[in-house]
Image (cartoon, rainbow, N blue to C red):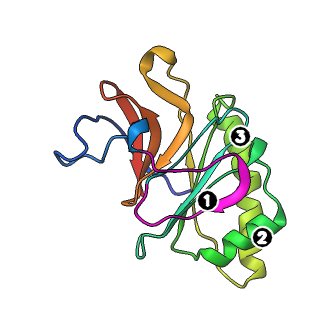
Amino acid sequence: MDAVAPTASARALSDPTVGSGPPRAIPVAMTSRHNMAPTVTQNGADVLYTSGLGDCVAIATFHPATGTRTLTHPNAGDVTPAWASTLAGMIDSTTYVIIANGTNQISPQVFRSGDFTRICTAIATAMQARGKNNPRFVMYHTPDLGRSSGVRMDTFVMYANGVYGRIGNTTVNVPISRV
């Protein structure tokens, strides 16, 4: 399974309506929270987010042509064949599937060889069963920046424009990416 490398950067995010940068991720901007469950949340222009990622992962999708997004927060990164089949019915080979680590998955190597590969394989198997090509898998791993950083490492957020990352405050550089 080849992963597409995200265009990652750390930017100082200030006013979400000014400048060329993406909107900042702050708790007051969140509208569609996804609780821990092996289900998929899909919501138009709302910000999709989840928190409490410890042993868990966040699995988000983004279709660049349609803007369709999904988000799921499976407990301990466990996905079932039924869940993968449902997701495979919603996406295609041009969809980005972003898999983000939780706070207990510090090592990117361990995350890649464990949860990331297992989830990619489950989705790829479901896509193949539907006669579809694999989507574009993206591993989003950020190290623990510590509590003083202001970044909530147990979170994942995705905006309608494909910008995704962690929830942070307005005075810190927040690791973000865009598909």
Give the extent of the magenta segment. 30-46
Quarter of the image with the N terminus is bottom right
Residue 7 seen in this snapshot: no
**Compared with residue 76, is residue 71 higher up or lower down, i.e. above or below?**
below
Q: Quadrant of the rendered structure where residue 80 is?
A: bottom right
Residue toward you, 178 or 40 = 40
> Tag 3's secondary structure?
loop
> Tag 1's secondary structure?
loop
> Which amino acid type corresponds to the residue marked 3 in the rendered image?
Cys
Residue where numbered disc 2 is placed: 125
**Compared with residue 94, is residue 38 higher up or lower down, i.e. above or below?**
above
Residue where numbered disc 3 is placed: 56
Residue found at x 37% / y 28%: 169
Residue where numbered disc 1 is placed: 2
Residue found at x 53% / y 43%: 156
| x, y percent for residue 173 | 34, 29
Tell me, for residue 66, which label it has, or none: none
| x, y percent for residue 59 | 62, 53
Q: How far apart are labels 2 and 1 at the CA level?
A: 15 Å
